[in-house]
């Protein structure tokens, strides 16, 4: 069950706000964290299976003030159905066109060409045994 938790925190400075958001982000099950309210003193946490009491205690330890205001269930919005696309009829001559409908010239521009193989000579270089770079 997805839930929305509103916690009132003190908003003395931006550092306190950032610290509160960091603590809330580290909690298990958190999906999003935001600051709301007219004084920007409400921390809104949305997540699934978040322990609101534990989160409030963690904030209270670090910020010295945090009060749990509300916990409510977030209802999922119904997803709109995707629009159906018209089905294309298969081509009568599959060798003359590819699946994207472009004519098959030497190669289809939709797919990359086959890799070219090249032949290369490998030389084995072993330095002379009497050669010493130190001396």
Image (tube, helix red, strand yellow):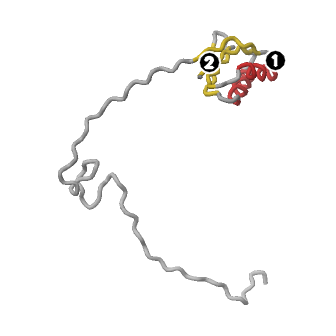
**Image location (x, y in percent) of residue 17:** 71, 21
Q: Residues within 10 Å of mark 1 (few under 14, many from 20)?
A: few
**Is residue 79 found left or right of 87 in the rendered image?**
right
In the displayed structure, 127 sits above or below 66; it is below
Quadrant of residue 57 in the image? top right
117 relative to 50, above or below: below
Reading the image, the residue beneath label 1 is 64
Q: Are marks 2 and 1 in contact (CB under 8 Å)?
A: no
Crowd band around label 2 with a 10 angstrom C-alpha radius: few (<14), some (14–19), many (20+) = many
What residue appears at the point 78 percent right and 81 percent down from the top-left corner? 134
In percent of width and height, residue 101 lies at 25, 48
Question: Does dot 2 land on a helix, a strand or a loop?
Answer: strand
How far from the left and from the top, in percent, is residue 22? 71, 28
Q: Which of 68 and 43 lies nearest the eye of the viewer?
A: 68
For marks 2 and 1, the one nearer the N-term is 2
Give the structural element (helix, strand or loop) at label 1: loop
Residue shown at 68% from the left, 88% from the top: 128
Image quadrant assignment for residue 30: top right
Q: CA distance from mark 2 to mark 1?
A: 22 Å
Residue depth check, mark 2 versus mark 1: number of the one nearer the observer: 2
Instruction: Give the label on residue 4, or none.
Output: 2
Q: Residue furthest front?
A: 1
Query: Is 88 on the left-hand or right-hand side of 79?
Result: left
Quadrant in the picture for the C terminus: bottom right
Point out the image quarter for the N terminus.
top right
């Amino acid at each position: 069950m997805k839930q929305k938790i509103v916690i009132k925190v003190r908003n003395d400075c931006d550092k306190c706000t950032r610290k509160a958001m960091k603590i809330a982000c580290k909690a298990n099950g958190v999906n999003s964290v935001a600051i709301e309210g007219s004084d920007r003193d409400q921390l809104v946490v949305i997540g699934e299976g978040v322990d609101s009491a534990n989160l409030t205690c963690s904030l209270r330890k670090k910020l010295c003030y945090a009060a749990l205001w509300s916990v409510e269930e977030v209802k999922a919005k119904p997803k709109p159905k995707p629009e159906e696309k018209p089905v294309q009829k298969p081509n009568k001559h599959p060798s003359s066109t590819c699946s994207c409908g472009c004519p098959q010239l030497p190669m289809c521009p939709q797919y990359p060409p086959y890799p070219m193989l090249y032949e290369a000579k490998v030389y084995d270089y072993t330095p002379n045994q009497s050669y010493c770079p130190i001396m």
